[in-house]
């Protein structure tokens, strides 16, 4: 037993030495671990932004960290990250829903935001903008401080909250170094905007009127200090700025620059600036928007405004003008994206909020409503619904919109654009009877037809057809007026669409069939040069080739990448489709010799001499199909034609599928490929 134990130990030591020897690359190539690849993950970069602050006093978000939740993706997970840096998280590739909570120092949430359907791609950083909005539940604190010079001589204070007096126990007044400080600090319900007002008086006469709007959010402090100077007492307010007549609305917005106005006065002129008149002389102090409900649609209006208080009025703001269009109607039916089982569908929309005389209707084949895509243009419709008088085509998607018009031809805004698809269930299909059928692998095609062969297509449907017609790439096939058609042998290689149009009870229904003509192979087939097909361009991503064919065996068990001297070749890439150009570039720069790219370029098999050293991604495709290709050395490393720099090039270890960078002077195995 002791001898057997010693023997077993000896055998294990020998095996360990063999494993270490092979893993160190002793019999193949040496590499420098400058870069390794990790497939199947990507990086999410969150760009977190707080919502903007307006004239209304809002809390400043003091964020200590973020809690991030990931759901509806390849897995569910969460993470807590510091607020000191832009969050970056490594995730599995796929689609993710993300929710972020901003946390204060105590770990309590103070703001939140979410986004859905974020796609994470392999080896890619995906930036995502996400707005954080303060939480509007619970209670928050207002901390409002107002100071003024003591020599002003204020002898009474009248603080108001939403027009009601504030209890004297809820605020304080103090004087330090000639400055009077009024402070109000209380907890209030979150999600509410409060109107705070402070009347400062001397001998019962108003000296200043301070008004602030305060927004409360849960767990946060809405804080502001207002410093009053001499110019704020017994003075007129400063003028509002940035007045804007919001296009397409009856809303005015502006920037309130004063703390002491008691109201705003809005003036309006129609047509030009020659007839200004007051439309509202008592817009609330502290506000920054107002709606002119007396404005009539179809006119051009000019607006200006000023701030007033007990001591006078400010200068006028800037002027803002625009055409007031009739508001857009709301489309009701068909709903956006709906499938409609009627070739003369009913369209319905909401009545205009303005008393419209009639409506205009557009229906087109494209959402841009270009003249060449217009199908229906109706004007003068006197009701908010219509049954289309003309037939639409089954299977076609249409886009529609409505615009209201009044009796003076004052046009409104176009509605939102909706789409609908005519989808009548008639079981109309095309079936094929093909010679030499090929297993279908191409995405987006119904069949592959071998060059020089025919196929028979038959359209089937319910009901009795009045007529048949067939179209090849929009050109009618003359004489094809039956339910079946035979063709194909006279077509050149390429992609085609054949469409059958069937007339059933006065309605024209259509169905299309997509196919390719050419010499086709499936993955794993023997290619024309005698190698193995390991890639098929099923999505038509590459213009210059449809297939990649690997040589049936390695053409070198160990050869250098360089031709004796290290220098930067340049102009090589790692993506699919670049291997052939990479090889030509390398040979053009390095010249004749015995190295990886050269022996691939001049490799000849079955009179095919268009072989090349694969790019890194092409090499990785071979690794994925290594068992169907066959002949690979399982623990060897293979050269790609993708250069890293003057000293290193990319290789792939076929024992692990891990990409590495190897010195060009070391030796690796070589398997050439060709594209056609």
Image: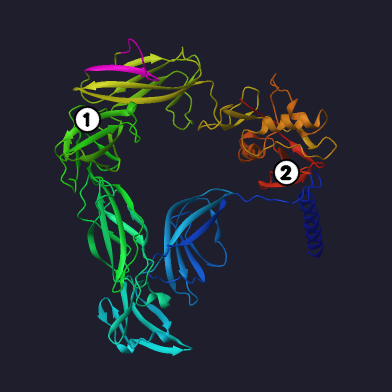
Vertical placement of residue 107 versus 514, above or below: below
Classify mark 1: helix, strand or loop.
loop
**Residue at left offset 21%, top offset 31%:** 378
Residue 180 position, x and y percent, is 42, 86
**Crowd tier of the residue under label 2, counting other residues whose Cα lies within 10 Å: few below 14, some 14–19, many 20 or above:** many
Between 675 and 182, the residue placed more toward the observer is 182
Query: Mark 1 = which residue?
Result: 343
Residue 488, by quadrant, is: top left
> Which quarter of the image is occupied by the N terminus?
bottom right
Could you tell me if the residues under marks 2 and 1 are in contact, i.e. CB atoms within 8 Å?
A: no
Where is residue 331? Give x, y as percent.
24, 43
Q: Looking at the picture, tell me which residue is in the foreground, 424 or 589.
A: 589
Of callouts 2 and 1, the N-terminal one: 1
Above or below, 382 against 221 in this view is above
Q: Which residue is mark 2?
A: 644
Query: Of 610 and 165, which appears nearest the observer?
Result: 165
Q: Residue at x 33, y 33 (%)?
A: 369
Measured Cα–Cα span from mark 2 to mark 1: 61 Å
| Residue 100 picture quarter | bottom left
Find the magenta span and give its range: 466-480
221 horizontally vs 89: left or right: left
Q: Is 459 one of the magenta-colored residues? A: no
In the image, 266 versus 205, the foreground residue is 205
> Looking at the figure, which quarter contains the C terminus?
top right
């Amino acid at each position: 037993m002791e001898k057997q134990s010693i023997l077993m130990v000896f055998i294990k030591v020998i095996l360990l030495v063999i494993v270490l020897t092979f893993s160190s690359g002793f019999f193949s190539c040496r590499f420098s671990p400058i870069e390794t690849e990790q497939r199947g993950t990507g990086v999410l970069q969150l760009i977190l932004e707080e919502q903007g602050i307006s004239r209304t006093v809002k809390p400043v978000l003091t964020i200590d960290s973020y809690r991030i939740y990931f759901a509806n993706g390849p897995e569910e997970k969460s993470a807590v990250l510091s607020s000191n840096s832009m969050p970056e998280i490594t995730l599995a590739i796929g689609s993710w829903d993300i929710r972020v909570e901003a946390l204060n120092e105590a770990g309590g949430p103070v703001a939140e935001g979410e986004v859905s359907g974020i796609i994470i791609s392999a080896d890619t950083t995906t930036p995502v903008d996400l707005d954080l909005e303060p939480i509007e539940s619970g209670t928050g604190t207002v901390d409002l401080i107002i100071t003024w010079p003591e020599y002003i001589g204020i002898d009474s204070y009248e603080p108001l909250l939403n027009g009601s007096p504030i209890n004297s126990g809820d605020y304080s007044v103090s004087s330090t170094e000639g400055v009077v400080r009024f402070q109000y600090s209380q907890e209030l319900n979150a999600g509410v905007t409060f109107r705070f007002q402070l009347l400062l008086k001397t001998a019962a006469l108003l000296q200043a009127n301070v008004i602030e709007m305060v927004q409360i959010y849960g767990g946060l402090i809405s804080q502001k200090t207002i410093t009053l100077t001499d110019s704020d007492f017994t003075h007129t307010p400063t003028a509002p700025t940035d007045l804007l007549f919001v296009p397409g609305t009856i809303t005015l917005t502006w920037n309130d620059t004063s703390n002491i106005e008691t109201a705003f006065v809005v003036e309006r002129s129609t047509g030009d600036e020659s007839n200004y008149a007051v439309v509202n002389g008592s817009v609330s102090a502290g506000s920054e928007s107002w709606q002119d409900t007396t404005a009539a649609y179809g006119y051009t209006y000019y607006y200006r405004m000023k701030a007033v208080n007990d001591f006078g009025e400010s200068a006028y703001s800037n002027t803002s003008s625009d055409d007031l269009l009739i508001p857009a109607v709301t489309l009701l039916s068909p709903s956006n994206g709906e499938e409609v089982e009627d070739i003369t569908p009913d369209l319905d929309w909401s009545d205009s909020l303005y008393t419209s005389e009639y409506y205009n209707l557009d229906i087109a084949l494209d959402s841009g409503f270009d003249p060449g895509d217009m199908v229906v243009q109706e004007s003068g419709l006197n009701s908010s619904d219509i049954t289309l008088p003309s037939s639409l085509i089954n299977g076609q998607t249409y886009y529609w919109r409505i615009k209201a018009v009044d009796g003076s031809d004052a046009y409104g805004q176009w509605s939102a654009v909706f789409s609908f698809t005519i989808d009548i269930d008639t079981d109309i299909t095309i079936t094929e009877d093909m010679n030499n059928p090929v297993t279908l692998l191409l995405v987006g095609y119904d069949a592959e037809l071998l060059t020089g062969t025919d196929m028979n297509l038959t359209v089937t449907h319910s009901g009795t057809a009045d007529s048949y017609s067939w179209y090849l790439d929009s050109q009618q096939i003359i004489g094809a007026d039956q339910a079946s058609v035979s063709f194909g042998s006279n077509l050149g290689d390429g992609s085609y669409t054949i469409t059958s149009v069937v007339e059933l009870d006065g309605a024209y229904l259509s169905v299309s069939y997509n196919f390719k003509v050419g010499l086709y192979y499936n993955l794993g087939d023997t290619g024309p040069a005698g190698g193995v097909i390991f890639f098929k361009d099923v999505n038509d991503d590459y213009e210059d080739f449809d297939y990649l064919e690997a040589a049936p065996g390695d053409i070198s068990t160990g050869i250098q990448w360089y031709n004796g001297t290290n220098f930067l070749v340049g102009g090589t890439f790692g993506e699919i489709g670049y291997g052939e150009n990479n090889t030509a570039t390398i040979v053009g720069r390095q010249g004749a010799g015995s190295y990886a790219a050269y022996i691939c370029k001049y490799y000849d098999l079955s009179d095919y001499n268009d072989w090349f050293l694969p790019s890194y991604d092409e090499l990785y495709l071979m690794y994925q199909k290594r068992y169907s290709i066959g002949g690979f050395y399982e623990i060897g490393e293979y050269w790609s034609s993708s250069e890293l720099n003057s000293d290193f090039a990319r290789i792939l270890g076929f024992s692990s599928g891990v990409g590495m960078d190897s010195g060009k002077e070391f030796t690796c195995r070589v398997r050439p490929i060709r594209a056609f």
